[in-house]
Image (tube, rainbow, N blue to C red):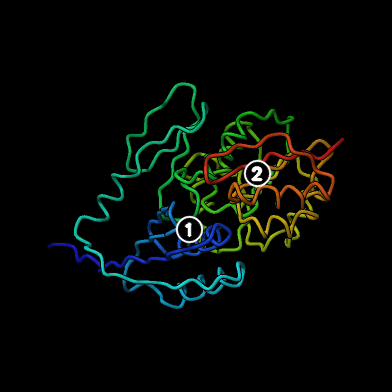
Amino acid sequence: MKRHIQPLETLILDQLPDEAVPAYEAALIAVSATVALFRDEATDTWRIEAVREATADPDALSAALALAAGLTGHDATLARNPTEAEGWLARTVEAFPEQPIATRFLVRPSHAEQRRVWGRHVLTLDAGLAFGSGEHSSTRGCLTALEALRLPPNARVLDLGAGSGILAMGAAKLAHVRVLASDLDPWSVRVAEENAVANGLRGRIRAVLALGWNHREIHARAPYDLVFANILARPLCAMAKDLAQHLAPGGRAILAGLLDSQVQMVLAAHRRQGLVLERRISLTPWSTLVLRRRG
């Protein structure tokens, strides 16, 4: 019997300014199977397209867009178009191949041949389950920054806004440490835990449901030698004081989810808390910052 294929739709947000892109991209990632960004050089604006099942929860979409509008102050107009479903899911799977990242990591989908690759830490996970499958420049920038760091033995590591848990897994495999991962989305917490088990990291990654720094275990494990925060520019600025207070002397933070045009704003917020810039990785239009607490 032929499997019934759910009808699909393409969601389109057009003419977005730079500062609105991260929040709206995150909104569509939360409710869609795939998301793509396109820059219109003539108008200096962005277009975001996402594909999802046409019968998916409309309330979740409305809530995600409302949150993005509230965060950015930009009320984007959504267009919805029916999309040919036949073969689309198979094409999507085929379009997510193995991805070498920097010199030490390889992100591999679960449908690929599970073989060992000399000199690389393999992170097995699938696109579309939760944010963070290696395609996005923010994730790639964080893993590139991670492999250049030398963490102390028994380093304390926090992945704030972990999504799929890809950064937590990268740190656990590269530095042989235990990592606390947190996210405000219950589905992401579940996916991060499942990905950790699938990658042989049971007991080395713990995922908790938390909004920012508001969790007892996050406070109890501080101070941290390394904090990942791959979220959005404005939340990063708002949480700069919390980050500085929870970093160990000499500890580092890898910040991402910000556009090149937002770097100075994020840097200013963290410099006011005494953190210093060690490195900037630009994978245009996205930037990753490595900051250090003095001491």
Residue of label 1? 45
Kindly indicate the quadrant of the structure image that contains residue 108.
top left
Find residue 96 and report its horizontal and vertical position in percent: 35, 44
**Depth order, front residue of 96/276:** 276
Residue at left offset 81%, top offset 40%: 293
Residue at left offset 28%, top offset 44%: 94
Task: Assign the C terminus to one quadrant of the image.
Answer: top right
Question: Which residue is situated farthest in the top direction here?
Answer: 118
**Depth order, front residue of 80/62:** 80
Residue at left offset 61%, top offset 63%: 184
Residue of label 2? 179
Q: Residues within 10 Å of mark 1 (few under 14, many from 20)?
A: some
Question: Which residue is situated farthest in the left direction here?
Answer: 1
Helix, strand or loop at mark 2 = strand
Query: Which of labels 2 and 1 is toward the front?
Result: 1
Q: In this view, does 192 lie to the left or right of 92?
A: right
**Residue flagged by tag 2: what amino acid is it?**
Val
Helix, strand or loop at mark 1 = strand
Q: Residues within 10 Å of mark 2 (few under 14, many from 20)?
A: many
Task: Assign the N terminus to one quadrant of the image.
Answer: bottom left
For residue 64, the mark is none
Whichever of labels 2 and 1 marks the residue nearer the N terminus, that label is 1
Kindly indicate the quadrant of the structure image that contains residue 114.
top left
